[in-house]
Image (tube, rainbow, N blue to C red):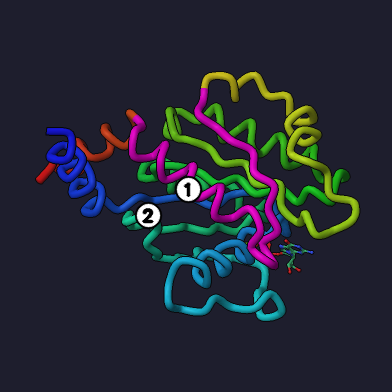
Amino acid sequence: MFSLFYGLWKYVFSKTEFHVLILGIDKAGKTTLLEKLKSLYSNVEGLPPDRIVPTVGLNIGRVEASNTKLVFWDLGGQSGLRPIWEKYFEEAHAVIYVIDAASPSRFEDSKSALEKLLRHEDLQGAPLLIVANKQDLAGAVSVDELSRYLDLKELDERQHMFEAVCAHDGRGVKQGIDWLVEVMQRSKRTERLRIRAGVSGP
Ligand SMILES: Nc1nc2c(ncn2[C@@H]2O[C@H](COP(=O)(O)OP(=O)(O)OP(=O)(O)O)[C@@H](O)[C@H]2O)c(=O)[nH]1
Ligand SMILES: [Mg+2]
């Protein structure tokens, strides 16, 4: 009986495409992370860091992880571009929020952009992976320090995880994605999005 349900469950998720927004302020390392995700999870080699330029439009990456189709949407983080983010909120299953852990002078900006996003009704119930990026740099803070700094009460009501990552060499990326896939599969938001799209199962 268990294997029947498990098979059905796996079947439903092999059909579902999860939309994951990659957000964060400019220079946090979002596009570098997206390109690393492509290299790690698809047979397309992502761009090397020295070929990545600041994002103005939208970068898309499609990969398959743990038998699940993931579509990443990477948007520009410059302050003038942040108002565009909310256009993608409604359709997103989850958010990866990237922070440059080696730039404390930008933590305030990063925190307030995250705060806004957490308060937005179109993102209600979306699981959140907070990436403490650039762990290869000497000044990078740990996830504990970053979480203490952010100290956001809005996080208490949301499924979230902090992950120490280096988008250059890929460390920490798989752990974060494994967690994200698992929580997206079980989240009420995924169920709501599936019903809205008219997909009720096989
Ligand atoms: N040392 C180090 N540098 C990184 C890492 N990830 C990204 N960078 C560098 O940080 C800079 C900004 O990276 P991007 O990926 O363009 O940042 P972004 O968040 O996409 O920036 P916008 O598109 O402007 O929003 C580049 O010089 C990257 O090479 C990392 O893990 N370690
Ligand atoms: Mg970018």
Q: Position of residue 110 (x, y in %)?
A: 72, 42
Q: Earlier in the sequence, mark 2 or mark 1?
A: 2
Q: Secondary structure at mark 1?
A: helix
**Numbered circle sitting on residue 6:** none
Please tell me which residue is depicted at 84% across the width and 49% down the height of the picture: 140
The amino acid type found where label 1 is placed reads: Asp
Please tell me which residue is depicted at 58% across the width and 35% down the height of the picture: 161
The amino acid type found where label 2 is placed reads: Ser
Quadrant for ligand 1? bottom right
**Does residue 144 sit above or below 167 in this rendering?**
above
In the image, 104: left or right of 157? right
**Numbered circle sitting on residue 178:** 1
**Does residue 118 sit above or below 94 in this rendering?**
above
Mark 1 neighbour density, 10 Å: few (under 14) some (14–19) many (20 or more): few
| Residue at which label 2 appears | 66
Q: Secondary structure at mark 2?
A: loop
